[in-house]
Image (cartoon, rainbow, N blue to C red):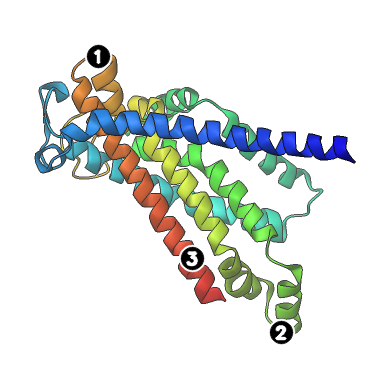
Amino acid sequence: MPGTRIGEKALTCLLYLSALIIIGILLAIVGYIVYKGLAMINLDFIMQAPRRAGKEGGISSTIVGTLYLTVLSLAIAAPLGVGTAIHLEEYAQKESYFAYLVTLTAETLAAIPSIIYGLFGFVFFVIYLKLGWSIWSGSLTLAIMVWPTITRTAQEAILSVPREYRENSLALGASKWQTIRKIVIPAAIPGIVTGMILALGRAIGETAAVLLTAGTSLGMPLSPADPARSMSVHLYMLAMEGLSMERAFGTAFLIIILLLFINYLANRSMSLLSHNGG
């Protein structure tokens, strides 16, 4: 009917317009940061340590601190998240109270503001466990933050594996754990990697929780017991305290480049994994 077709075309145009608005907002934000920050980018800015609270020098120690925090937090959260997902989808009874409690916990943790994680990490890791402001405190706090993301995406990835794969493997004499390890997990790897990349992106961009647990030291961290200032915290300190807006935009530019590079590696990895699996 003519009226139905007009309505469908109007809805299609509305959807395209919504997508274009989102893309336009993204390009405007990224373009402005690139325009303001590109002038600061040079080898000295990347390789030199910050001086005078960040007013001078570069951001080398904050880059190292960011890598320390994100890699260590992911190393802690990834096995826990994937293990939780495997238990919930392959071993736990769907109607059991324990499975319901774990799922509820993951959903609740995912909705908690980051400042609450920071306060918890400060009280528990920094003060109670006496880890002090350190990479350990920051990484453990970030691991708790990103664990729900890894768990939920790993669950969806495991659920997407056809049930026939499991049944065929078990029919050939493989044990349940062999089926999970050699059939289910390899097939779910692209989705699991996606969850880890989402977690990594959140960890890199986190400010409040890291500020309260890892500290704001400008020194080069040499071990997980040292305090560190992440790039996002450095950006916050430079901008909010009015120390150097030029260096703040330069730091923001490098954060965007780092996130784009991580997403590129993730897409390449998933493409290779899918190709090898095929």
Which residue does the numbered mark 3 point to in the structure image?
A: 271
- Discs 3, 2 touching: Cβ within 8 Å: no
Q: Is residue 272 left or right of residue 16?
A: left
Q: For the point 18% across and 44% down, which residue is it? A: 222
Q: Position of residue 102 (x, y in %)?
A: 67, 43
Task: Please state, as top left, top right, bottom left or bottom right, where the N terminus lies in the image.
Answer: top right
- The first of marks 1 and 3 along the sequence is 1
- The first of marks 1 and 2 along the sequence is 2
Vertical arrangement, residue 178 with respect to residue 250, above or below: below
Is label 3 in a helix, a strand or a loop? Answer: helix
Badge 2, how many Cα within 10 Å: few under 14, some, many 20+? few
Q: Is residue 7 left or right of residue 201?
A: right
Examine the rendering and report whether any part of residue 6 can be seen: yes
- Determine the residue located farthest toward the front in the rendered image: 2
Which tag is nearer the camera, tag 3 or tag 2? 3
Q: Which amino acid does label 1 sit on?
A: Glu
Is label 2 in a helix, a strand or a loop? Answer: loop
Which residue does the numbered mark 2 point to in the structure image?
A: 173
Which residue does the numbered mark 1 point to in the structure image?
A: 241
Badge 3, how many Cα within 10 Å: few under 14, some, many 20+? few
